[in-house]
Image (cartoon, helix red, strand yellow):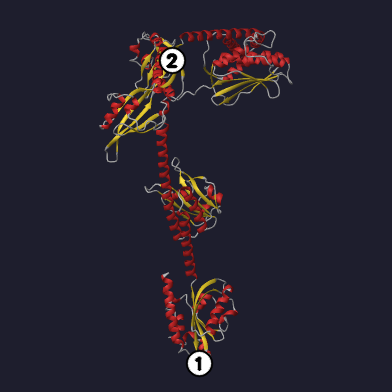
Amino acid sequence: MPRVDETRAELLAQLAEIQAKLATLDDSDSPEHEENPPHADTGSAASYFVDSDHPRQADIALIEWAADGAIRRWTPQAERIFGWKADEVLGKRWDEFSFVHEQDIPLVEKSVRELLERNVDFNRCFNRNVRKDGTVLNCEWFNAVRRDDQGQITAAISLPHDVTERVRVESHMLHIQNAMRMITVGTARSTGLAFFQALVRYISESLGFRYVFVARIDKDSPQRARTIAFFAEGQLKDDFEFDLAGTPAANVVNHSMEFCAEHLQQRFPNDITLTRFQAESYLGTPLISSTGEVLGILAVLDDKPMEDRADIREMIALFGDRTAIEIERSVNEAAQHASKMRLRILTEQMPTVLWTTDLQLRFTHSTGAGLKSMGQKPNQFVGHTLFEYFQTDDESFGPIAIHFAALQGVSGSSEIEWSGRVFQVHVEPLRDPNGTIIGTIGLAQDISEIKRVERSLVQSEERFRRMIQHAPEAVVLLDTQTGRFVMVNQAAEKLYKYSAEQLLQMGPLDISPEIQPDGQPSADKSREVISRACAGETPIFEWLHRDAKGAEIPCEIRLLSLEENGRTIIRGSVTDVTEKKRAEESLKRLESELAHVARVSTMGEMVGGLAHELNQPLYAIQNFGKACGNLVAAEGEIDRDRLHQWLDRITSTAQYAGEILLRLRSFVSREPIHKTTCDLDEIIKTALMLTKHDAQVAGIRVEYTPAPGLPPVKADAVQIQQVLVNLLKNSFDAVLEESHGDPLVRVSAEPRADRVAVTVTDNGPGLPDGIPIFEAFCSTKKKALGLGLAIGTTIAKAHGGTLQAKNGPEHGAVFSFTLATALPVPDGP
């Protein structure tokens, strides 16, 4: 080190000056000399080393020893270096207090003997000293003796120089040099994976880092990386993947070195890898390719704080560059190897034949899996001419003619049949690096199977077209780009009453009304179903068409997406459902008639109870009428208030009777199903009114508590009343047969999302096993037709739900069905 050499030269010059001045120093040990040694001689060596005007000598002290080894002079520099004050050491020998490191005492004793016992005036010693506070120092001592006229030693002068920092720096530099040498030598003969594994090992072992890894960034997922070499705790470990986000590596991949001396996990709390290794410090450098792309990361971690040293950073960056070069080389080598392998596979395994000829059209090479189909081996005909191979002298023969053309610089292709196979042949001129034609190179692909498939495909397409043409349902093919039909079959012509030529100038919207029966515009619905078909679905939906005469045709359509010559074709199968619709309407009428018959039948069963329900208001009217007559016939003044009160009771009771009759009339009406916005609470109360008498006569308690905030429903009120009446009557029969406690029937209604659930529960014997109670004419009662639950199932289905039944959690049966809530009517503008 230049600074060390400079200091040493200064010390030697100063020592020479000391030796010159020693001759003039007063040898007296007078008290004055001892009490004020710094001022004894301002030109002496002692004054030189205690003078504060010489800061460069701050780490150099002067100590004077008596002939018996006792300390006679101890400068302030000595106090600063060793921590001992002058009054603590004056008069003491060096071995009388903890001044020399115990392991270096023999070395100091040898140096002292050399001065005292040999005829030398100067020596140098390097040893460790101990400060007063226990700190160990590395010191370099320059020692000289002073003699009298007889040559006897009268004193010794020592110049101790604190070189602790110099030793530390030299030691670290030596360590770095050894580490560089170790890593360089250890990786010099390695490439690929061996290089990466050697690199992480030698970095860890030479620099003392606990964890070292090289990681590659995933090209498909740039936010993830995977180690390709990982050295931990003295051995190579399994590779692992990690996310870059939230880790110190995230900054590294942005082309910058990342260093964290301590508290690493606190800075990156979401990095599970750091937690796994209990990492405290980190140093990472990007691996940058020759094109500037970040290929990966070289990083070191430790479980203790890390010193920030420029030389360590430079070393990691240096080997990061070397690692990037090796990764790039490995990638290129792998790509070249893969390319060679692909070329070999291409030439040896693909179903082709590759050959070359010279200028005389002699084979010089032949390869390819296609030779096998010809019963030949690679290079079997090398040395033979094309004339010999094809057994002809005709130069105009197709395969030979294109080779002659290639010798003239003209490429050529032809399709030939040979050995019962069909080949597509292409021949090019073969040129040397200078561009001179030296022969031909040819490639022949066996297309026999392709030809067979093409013929089969043509036949299959023809069969497909014939099948479509004669299909019983109408079939159309629609081009999604133009929106027009590209093919229609005979059934489509018959259905729409247009000729094929006319239909091929149209699209679906040209033969449809603007609005479909469900209220959706035809254009919007058409886009929706075609988009679903293009997405891979097979939509089936109802559609209304119009034929050439304007007649409406209800249809059921099934769509299927097909690809043809790079365009999307939609195949539509169209079925006329006019008769099906008529049958459905007829079925609905029959179901309505059956439901009406069932209601009339039910009303017949309940006629006694209904008569009692009407007798009560009629009897009340009669009594109030007689009371009014008596009040008018009585002598004296008429009590008008009471008369008005009784007349009001007659009016309200008559209205109640009329309401009962209105509900009964509605219940037994034959009107078709008509869904409206209804009050479900009112529907339930009507059903309870119709069955109230039967429950009272039988002693059955019926409970109904309206649910708060019950929304209106979309339903046919009469039909829902019919379902409830049938369920209530069935529950009455069940609890009369057997009940757990007093006969009890509960009715409830509660909202469920966009529907309302209605439930009828009883405490009877529960549902019978093995009996299909929802089938028509199936009943557990002897005198019943078994139509109630079957009709209820039909009504529930017509309302978009199902009628369900199950046993209660403890006993009895639970019947339930759901109704759609009525959509809220939007406010007007």
Of 818 and 93, nearer the camera is: 93
Q: Badge 1: how crowded within 10 Å, few (<14), some, or many (20+)? A: few
Sequence-wise first label, 2 or 1: 1
- Cα separation between marks 2 and 1: 135 Å
Of 326 and 215, nearer the camera is: 326
Could you tell me which residue is drawn at 47 percent across and 66 percent down? Answer: 169
Q: Position of residue 49 (x, y in %)?
A: 46, 80
Determine whether, in the image, residue 199 is placed left or right of residue 817: left
Judge whether 658 appears above or below 826 on screen. above
- Asked if the residue at tag 1 contacts the one at tag 2, i.e. Cβ–Cβ closer than 8 Å, the answer is no
Instruction: Check disc 1 and give the amino acid type.
Output: Gln
Q: Position of residue 784 (x, y in %)?
A: 67, 8
Q: Position of residue 82 (x, y in %)?
A: 53, 75
| Residue that lies at the very extreme toward the bottom in this rendered image | 149
What residue is pinned by disc 2? 573
Q: Nearer the viewer, mark 2 or mark 1?
A: 1
Could you tell me which residue is drawn at 42 percent across and 39 percent down? Answer: 338
Instruction: Check disc 2 and give the amino acid type.
Output: Ser
What residue is pinned by disc 1? 150
Of 586 and 396, nearer the camera is: 396
Q: Badge 2: how crowded within 10 Å, few (<14), some, or many (20+)? A: many
Determine whether, in the image, residue 146 is placed left or right of residue 739: left
Q: Secondary structure at mark 2?
A: strand
Determine whether, in the image, residue 692 is placed left or right of residue 456: right
**Residue 454 can be seen in this image:** yes
The quadrant of the rendering that contains the N terminus is bottom left
Q: Secondary structure at mark 1?
A: loop
Q: Position of residue 622 (x, y in %)?
A: 65, 9
Looking at the rendered structure, which numbered label has been put on residue 386? none
The quadrant of the rendering that contains the C terminus is top left
